[in-house]
Amino acid sequence: MGESKPLVTIGIPTRNRRLMLEDALTSALSQASDVEYEVVIADDASSDEEQLRYLRALPFSNVRVVFRES
């Protein structure tokens, strides 16, 4: 059997906005739903090392981070 794909994708674009990102991610993950979903965070070449460390350490299996290098 193949891996099931989520029915809904929540996209969060970000660049050097760690606190706003954390709020957005918390909101996305707190949605009560019967639907399988994933969260895709698109980091647009952030230079904030604190944000980059935060993104690399996210422990959620339904969160994917895409990094765009500058």
Image (cartoon, helix red, strand yellow):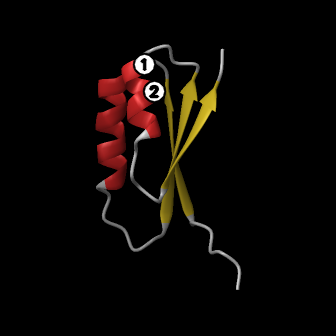
Estimate the x, y position of residue 40 in percent, counting from the top left.
Answer: 54, 45
State the residue at coordinates (45%, 27%): 52
Question: For mark 1, does the 10 Å Cα neighbourhood hold few (<14), some (14 to 19), or many (20 or more) residues?
Answer: few
Q: Quadrant of the N terminus?
A: bottom right
Give yes or no for contact between labels 1 and 2 (Cβ–Cβ under 8 Å): yes
Residue 17 in sight from this viewpoint? no
Amino acid type at circle 1 is Glu
* Label 1, label 2: how far apart the Cα atoms are: 5 Å
Q: Quadrant of the C terminus?
A: top right
Residue of label 1: 49
47 or 4: nearer the eye?
Answer: 47
Estimate the x, y position of residue 14 in percent, counting from the top left.
Answer: 48, 26
Residue 45 in sight from this viewpoint? yes
State the residue at coordinates (62%, 68%): 5
Secondary element at tag 1: helix
Q: Residue 20 sits in which quadrant?
A: top left
Estimate the x, y position of residue 63 in percent, counting from the top left.
Answer: 48, 51
Residue of label 2: 52
Does 5 appear above or below 25?
below
State the residue at coordinates (32%, 35%): 22
Which residue reaches farthest bottom?
A: 1
Secondary element at tag 2: helix
State the residue at coordinates (30%, 45%): 26
Asked if residue 32 lies left or right of residue 65, the reply is left
Q: Residue 4 sits in which quadrant?
A: bottom right
Does 39 appear above or below 52?
below
Estimate the x, y position of residue 38 in percent, counting from the top left.
Answer: 51, 57
8 or 65: nearer the eye?
Answer: 65
Amino acid type at circle 2 is Leu
